[in-house]
Image: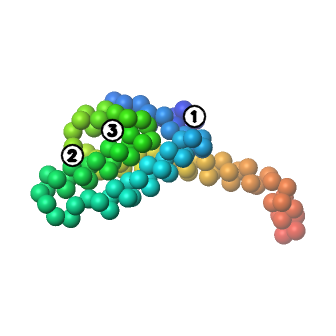
Amino acid sequence: MSQNELTTWDINGVSLELDIDDIDDLERYERAFNQMGEAAKRIPKDGTASEITKAYCKTFYDMYDCIFGSGTAEKIHSKKYSAKECETVYASFLAFVSAQRDARNAAREQIARYLPQNRAQRRRKK
């Protein structure tokens, strides 16, 4: 899998770039998830179903806008507030980020095998 395939998230006809190894992207990602956690605490527990669903969906919308830029969430969701759609898109996003992390961790494990301290540790074990 190429680096571009790992850093491009294609969802509902929209292609978005995010590289969690890039510090600027990672900072936006972390900030968005912190904001999402705070927003989730403010979702009303009572009220109409439509009010609760709109607040719930808004947490996802705000997260994507924080990471990818204003208006991105509307493009991804075609301006539709649907809890099911938000959850489906979110699952896709988490799988996209997870694939990047898995590839990064595999690469780091490969590199770590050849670091001087690890070679010395392997010689001592023999």
**Residue 55 in view here:** yes
| Earlier residue among tags 1 and 3 | 1
Q: With 125 as the anchor, is 25 left or right in this view? A: left
Q: Using the image, tell me which numbered label, if any, was put on residue 90.
A: none
Circle 2: element type: loop
Mark 1 surroundings within 10 Å by alpha-carbon count, few (fewer than 14), some (14 through 19), many (20 or more): few
Residue in the image at 11% along x and 57% along y: 48
Q: Quadrant of residue 76?
A: top left
The part of the image, by quadrant, that contains residue 12 is top left
Q: CA distance from mark 2 to mark 3?
A: 12 Å
For label 1, the residue is 2
Tag 3: amino acid: Ala
Q: How far, Cα to Cα, is label 1 from label 3? A: 26 Å
Occupied quadrant, residue 11: top left
- Which of these two is toward me, 8 or 53? 53
Foreground residue among 3 and 29: 29
In the rendered image, residue 33, in percent from the top left (x then y), is placed at 43, 53
Q: At which x and y percent is residue 67?
A: 45, 41
Disc number for residue 73: 3
Answer with mark 2 or mark 1, whichever residue precedes in sequence: 1
Disc 1 residue type (three-letter):
Ser
Coloration mode: rainbow
Q: For mark 2, what is the residue?
A: 82
Secondary structure beneath dot 3 equals helix
Q: Earlier in the sequence, mark 2 or mark 3?
A: 3
Of badges 2 and 3, nearer the viewer stands 3
Q: Residue at x 19, y 56 (%)?
A: 52
